[in-house]
Image: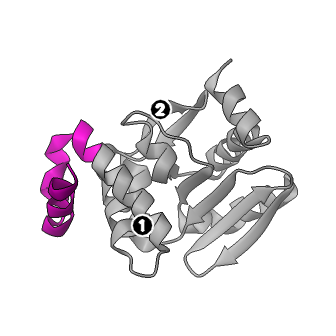
């Protein structure tokens, strides 16, 4: 069984939805994968039902129309556009946060769930996780997942610790 087939089983079609979304992103221009699935490209993967992406703002309306035409339910928020296919557990979030807009220019092609995907660079994935972890408005559970992702990245790539805030490194030292 391939990674994509396994993911499809546990997300009720999420793997196929992921492949469709990436195809739509490819057709609209610059994009890249960020978040947990991107972290999984650099460290031992863990399960996630979220796919987080960056799309250049000028293409967001066109992408939303394509997603809607492809049967995805679209919800707009202040800093994101979310999409989900009926019956699928895969949650797709496109960030509109300006801090992420340069990420696609540094992205590289990686295979994710059997699909060729533009993935944010290791440093950009880490920066994004640091921003998410530092956001006091995020739910505690989400921040804990961000913390775990940052710990996994630091263990695999110790040179990244240079961009981590001191309090996070201190927290890691206490927990190890």
- Does 131 sit left or right of 51 as displayed? left
Q: Mark 2 points at which residue?
A: 110
Q: Mark 1 points at which residue?
A: 143
- Which residue appears at 73% of the width and 64% of the height? 64
Give the vertical position of 119 relative to 142 (above or below): above
* Residue 21 position within the rendered picture, expressed as x and y whole percent measured from the top left: 69, 47
Quarter of the image where one finds residue 101? bottom left
The residue segment tinted magenta is 153-176
* Residue 74 position within the rendered picture, expressed as x and y whole percent measured from the top left: 77, 67
* Residue 156 counted in the magenta span: yes
Q: Main secondary structure of the magenta part?
A: helix
Q: How is the structure coloured here?
A: one colour
- Does 36 sit left or right of 152 as displayed? right
Label 1: few (<14), some (14–19) or many (≥20) C-alpha neighbours in 10 Å: some
- Which residue appears at 33% of the width and 72% of the height? 134
- Tell me the quarter of the image containing the N terminus: top right
- Which residue appears at 59% of the width and 62% of the height? 94
Q: Earlier in the sequence, mark 2 or mark 1?
A: 2
Question: What's the CA distance linking mark 2 and mark 1?
Answer: 26 Å
Q: Is residue 104 visible in the rendered structure shown here?
A: yes
* Residue 124 position within the rendered picture, expressed as x and y whole percent measured from the top left: 33, 53
Q: In the image as oriented, which residue stretches furthest toward the top?
A: 1
* Residue 87 counted in the magenta span: no
- Does 154 sit left or right of 103 as displayed? left
Q: Is residue 101 visible in the rendered structure shown here?
A: no
Give the vertical position of 119 relative to 164 (above or below): above
* Element type where label 2 sits in the image: strand
Q: Residue 30 carries which label?
A: none
């Amino acid at each position: 069984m391939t990674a994509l087939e396994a993911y499809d089983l546990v997300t009720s079609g999420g793997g196929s939805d992921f492949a469709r979304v990436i195809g739509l992103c490819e057709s609209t221009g610059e994009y890249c994968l960020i978040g947990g699935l991107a972290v999984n490209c650099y460290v031992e993967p863990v399960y996630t039902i979220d796919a987080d992406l960056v799309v250049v703002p000028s293409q967001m309306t066109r992408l939303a129309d394509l997603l809607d035409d492809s049967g995805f339910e679209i919800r707009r928020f202040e800093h994101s556009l979310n999409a989900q296919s009926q019956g699928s557990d895969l949650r797709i979030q496109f960030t509109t946060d300006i801090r992420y807009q340069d990420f696609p220019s540094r992205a590289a092609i990686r295979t994710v769930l059997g699909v060729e995907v533009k993935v944010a660079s290791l440093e950009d994935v880490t920066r994004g996780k640091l921003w998410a972890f530092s956001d006091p408005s995020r739910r505690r559970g989400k921040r804990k997942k961000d913390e775990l992702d940052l710990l996994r990245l630091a263990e695999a790539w110790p040179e990244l610790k240079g961009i981590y805030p001191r309090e996070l490194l201190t927290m890691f030292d206490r927990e190890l």
